Image (spheres, rainbow, N blue to C red):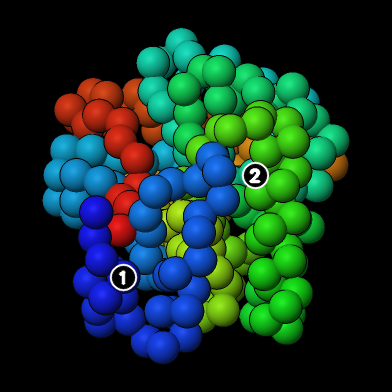
Amino acid sequence: MRTISAALKGLSIAAAVGAIFVAAPGTASAATPDVVKATSAGAGSQTFALTIDDGPSPTWTNQVLDLLKDREVKATFCVIGDHARQYPDLIKRIVDEGHSLCNHSMHHVNPSTQSPDQQRAAIQEASDAIHAAAPGAPINYYRAPEGGFTQDATQYAASQGMQPVGWSVDTEDWRLPGVDGIFQNYKKEFQGGGVILMHDGSEENDRSQSVEAMGNILSDLANNGYTDDLPAVLG
């Protein structure tokens, strides 16, 4: 077992305080406050990590899960706590089908607009909602809404065993640029070992373009010899 002094080497005092917290049950065993943007195999590898934000949604998450099952691809679902509370069966399905969970806060509020206490509460409440739906399921990642990562949020997430994860490929599917527009955004930015950002939530948003484009993206990745991976965990 690593000693406390070794584990805290190189961290700021604030990060050190967070690092000695005991990770909650069902979280990753180790993480750092650094925001990762590559797969566990690393940048330049023949891998990709597909991350899917803002769900779960009964309409879109089920379609995405059906697609991923058909293509035999595992993804990371960055779920909003409030949606996990509304649709616990979808959280269970995500876990049962072998995908990874990522905390995307309780109500999708940018942490940079919140106090440190509010940021921590938003993360903790989301974890609690996810675990209420899937007790004991690991939540290995944290993604700040709108990419608004702050020192307080990343340090708290890491202290709870969640690696902050960003992205290297923004498909901008939430803008509804059309199926080909989403695909071209992916083609323009993807390099091996990249983390791809797409969306499956929420119910009030039409994600049909995202689902269709996701199928095209997965076909392109497979045709070019890329295999699915998870975002890196640095701890």
- Using the image, tell me which numbered label, if any, was put on residue 4: 1
Counting from the top left corner in percent of width and height, residue 153 is at 57, 72
User: Marks 1 and 2: in contact by CB < 8 Å?
Assistant: no
In this rendering, the label closer to the viewer, 2 or 1: 1
In the image, is 218 to the left or to the right of 112?
left
Counting from the top left corner in percent of width and height, residue 206 is at 75, 38
N-term mark: 2 or 1? 1
Counting from the top left corner in percent of width and height, residue 42 is at 19, 51
Location of residue 109 with respect to 115 vertically, above or below: above
- Using the image, tell me which numbered label, if any, was put on residue 79: 2
* 224 or 150: nearer the viewer: 150
Quadrant that contains the C terminus: bottom left
Looking at numbered disc 1 in the image, what kind of residue is underneath it?
Answer: Ile
Residue 69 visible in the displayed image = yes
At x 37% / y 54%, what residue is drawn?
30
Q: Which of the 4 image quarters holds residue 120?
A: bottom right
SS for dot 1: helix
Quadrant that contains the N terminus: bottom left
Location of residue 230 with respect to 175 vertically, above or below: above
Looking at numbered disc 2 in the image, what kind of residue is underneath it?
Answer: Val
